[in-house]
Amino acid sequence: MIELHVDQESKVPIYIQVEEQIRSLIAAGRLRPDDQLPTIRQLAADLRVNYNTIARAYMDLDREGVISTRRGKGTFVAGVLDEEQMGRVRQEKLRGIINAALEEARSLGYSFTEVSQAIAEELARWQTDGPEDD
């Protein structure tokens, strides 16, 4: 069974948190095609959130082709994502990470200059210490 967590204090809406976590689990290979997801009702109860919140996340993911709902059988991870779809999922995840960091920095009162300088410094450090580019 998958484990998802929501941050009730986050400025990121809960349905987006759920969507991003499911996409991340798929991108990481922890959820594979045809793996069954919890029912909307079960996931809402597990996360202690409104049923409609999970329904919206599932509806968005279904519309994008990430998951599919089979009447009477449940909700499943859709078939293998092609390279373009996987690239989109990865880019959406990266943008979500960046946006969450920027929103937190804004809420803590950092200026644009402070944030951009810190990002530039961290990118420079990451380039010298981090993984190789493709």
Image (cartoon, rainbow, N blue to C red):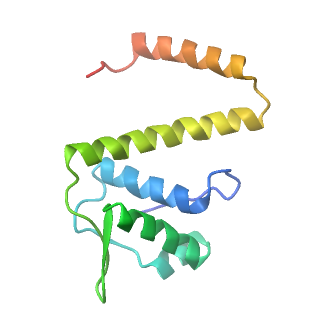
Q: Is residue 29 above or below residue 132?
A: below
Quadrant placement of the N terminus: bottom left
Quadrant placement of the C terminus: top left
- Horizontal placement of 29 versus 117: left or right? left
Q: Is residue 117 above or below residue 108?
A: above
Q: Residue 69: horizontal and vertical position, in percent?
A: 32, 77
Q: Most extreme residue toward the right, as rendered?
A: 109
Q: Residue at x 41, y 58 (%)?
A: 22
| Residue closer to the observer: 27 or 59 | 59
Q: Most extreme residue toward the front, as rendered?
A: 63
- Horizontal placement of 75 versus 125: left or right? left
Q: Is residue 71 above or below residue 76?
A: below
Q: Quadrant of residue 110?
A: top right
Q: Residue 107: horizontal and vertical position, in percent?
A: 76, 38
Q: Residue at x 44, y 64 (%)?
A: 60
- Horizontal placement of 114 versus 84: left or right? right
Q: Residue at x 61, y 75 (%)?
A: 50
Q: Residue 2: horizontal and vertical position, in percent?
A: 39, 64
Q: Most extreme residue toward the bottom, as rendered?
A: 72
**Figure label count:** 0
Q: Residue 122: horizontal and vertical position, in percent?
A: 54, 17
Q: Residue at x 56, y 12 (%)?
A: 121
| Residue closer to the observer: 126 or 96 | 96
Q: Quadrant of residue 70?
A: bottom left
